[in-house]
Image: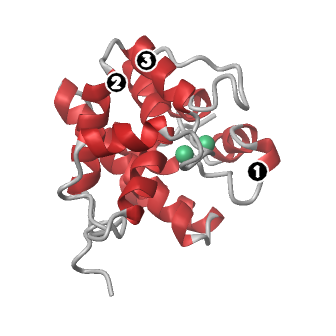
Amino acid sequence: MERITPTREMAMELLREYNQNENLIKHALAVEGVMVHFAELFGEDKEKWGIIGLIHDLDYEKYPDEHCIKAREILEERGWPEDYIHAVQSHGWGICTDVEPTERMEKVLYTIDELTGLITATVLMRPSRSVMDLTVKSVKKKWKQKSFAAGVNREIIEKGAEILGMEINQVIEETIKGMQKVAEEIGLRGETEE
Ligand SMILES: [Fe+2]
Ligand SMILES: [Fe+2]
């Protein structure tokens, strides 16, 4: 089959086609921002890492029970390359797929997906509602409160950091930085909020 070379524009269009929920769009943009930041950090392909971040939950709104499974179907149908599809599926390793993250890009995605959720929840609790001055310490504090953002699986983040070979604090620090770069788009810039 003819395979395409995905562009950011294509990914955004596809994401919009399958998602109406603005919170899910913001989550996709947050993960994209963090993926781009980590690609920069490691001197890797920013565009590719960003696109995979943007598209990783493509099927979640419409097919929550077939998450990561439908995504393969949709992306295959559109002629997306196998390495993109593998990366998307691997973020659900042990949750909705048995596709293990093997590439560094996949390990980063696996690690930061849940973490962006914890950071967003932490920011929304702050009076400033801004990620711009958020510290690792504040996130760690919320991390330890099991009842806070209880849906965020801390063990996955820990496991991800381990396979990535990074300290958890460093992962949190870089994830905050990545989210700061797209703070406006994900509604976490505080002062611009109504
Ligand atoms: Fe997901
Ligand atoms: Fe996600």
* Location of mark 3 (residue): 103
Q: Nearer the viewer, residue 137 or 167?
A: 137
Disc assigned to residue 64: 1
Which residue corresponds to the image point at 53% horizontal and 66% vertical from the top-left? 23
Instruction: Classify the position of the N terminus by image quarter.
Output: top right
Report the Cα–Cα distance between label 1 and label 2: 29 Å
Q: Which corner quadrant of the image does residue 21 belong to?
A: bottom right
Within 10 Å of the Cα at label 1, are there few (<14), some (14-19), or many (20+) other Cα atoms?
few
Residue drawn at x 63%, y 24% as measured from the top left = 93
Res 120 quadrant in image = bottom left
| x, y percent for residue 65 | 82, 46
100 on left or right of 186: right
The residue type indicated by label 2 comes to Ile
Residue placed at 33% from the left, 87% from the top?
194
Q: Is residue 69 left or right of residue 130?
A: right
Which one is earlier in the sequence, the residue at label 1 or at label 2? Answer: 1
Q: Nearer the viewer, mark 1 or mark 2?
A: 2
Q: Quadrant of ligand 1?
A: top right
Image position of 50 with respect to 132: above or below: above
| Residue 10 x %, y % | 46, 57
Local SS, label 1: helix
Q: Tag 2, which secondary structure?
A: helix
* Left or right, 175 with reference to 80: left
Asked if the residue at label 3 sits under 8 Å from ligand 1, the reply is no
